[in-house]
Image (tube, rainbow, N blue to C red):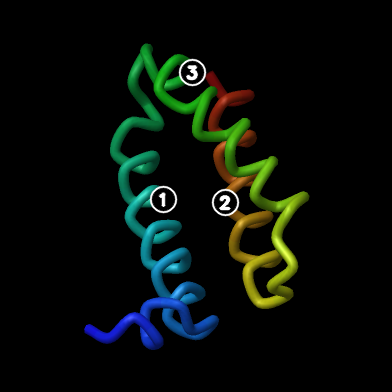
Amino acid sequence: MSKSLLKSRDFQEECVLSAIQVLAAHFAQWSYDVSFPEVATIPLILLKRLHEQTTIESLHRPVKRLIDQVSTWLHAL
């Protein structure tokens, strides 16, 4: 891959969206485990920071949706 492609906004956006999907699947697997709060706390803090700092509007909704879902799972335990 060329450096210009790696630096493009579309490529970076797709990478972040893919990471969000993988993280959501990981959290879904662990959501009923007793250790889920320990597994999810640090990533949840980092997701909140990403949501606050990102300037890419198309990432706000998926990141916020994942934050809300993980928070719901945390409060359900």
User: Foreground residue, 19 or 4?
Assistant: 4
The image shows residue 26 at horizontal and vertical percentages of 31, 43
Residue 61 found in image quarter:
bottom right
Q: Are marks 2 and 1 in contact (CB under 8 Å)?
A: yes
Taking 23 as reference, is 69 left or right?
right
Residue 31 found in image quarter:
top left
Residue 39 found in image quarter:
top left
Kindly identify the residue that appears in the image at 37 percent across and 13 percent down.
34
Q: Are marks 3 and 2 in contact (CB under 8 Å)?
A: no
**Looking at numbered disc 3 in the image, what kind of residue is underneath it?**
Pro
User: Foreground residue, 46 or 5?
Assistant: 5
Label 3: which residue? 37
Q: Are marks 1 and 3 in contact (CB under 8 Å)?
A: no
Kindly identify the residue that appears in the image at 57 percent across and 34 percent down.
44
Q: Any mark on residue 66, and which? A: 2
At mark 2, the secondary structure is helix
Tell me the quadrant of the picture where the N terminus can be found. Answer: bottom left
Q: Any mark on residue 24, and which? A: 1
CA distance for labels 3 and 2: 15 Å
**Looking at numbered disc 2 in the image, what kind of residue is underneath it?**
Leu
CA distance for labels 1 and 3: 14 Å
Vertical arrangement, residue 55 with respect to residue 49, above or below: below
Kindly identify the residue that appears in the image at 54 percent across and 81 percent down.
9
The image shows residue 18 at horizontal and vertical percentages of 37, 66
Residue count near mark 1 (Cα–Cα under 10 Å), binned few <14, some 14–19, many ≥20? some
Vertical arrangement, residue 5 with respect to residue 77, above or below: below
Vertical arrangement, residue 6 with respect to residue 46, above or below: below
Vertical arrangement, residue 73 with respect to residue 13, above or below: above
Q: Earlier in the sequence, mark 2 or mark 1?
A: 1
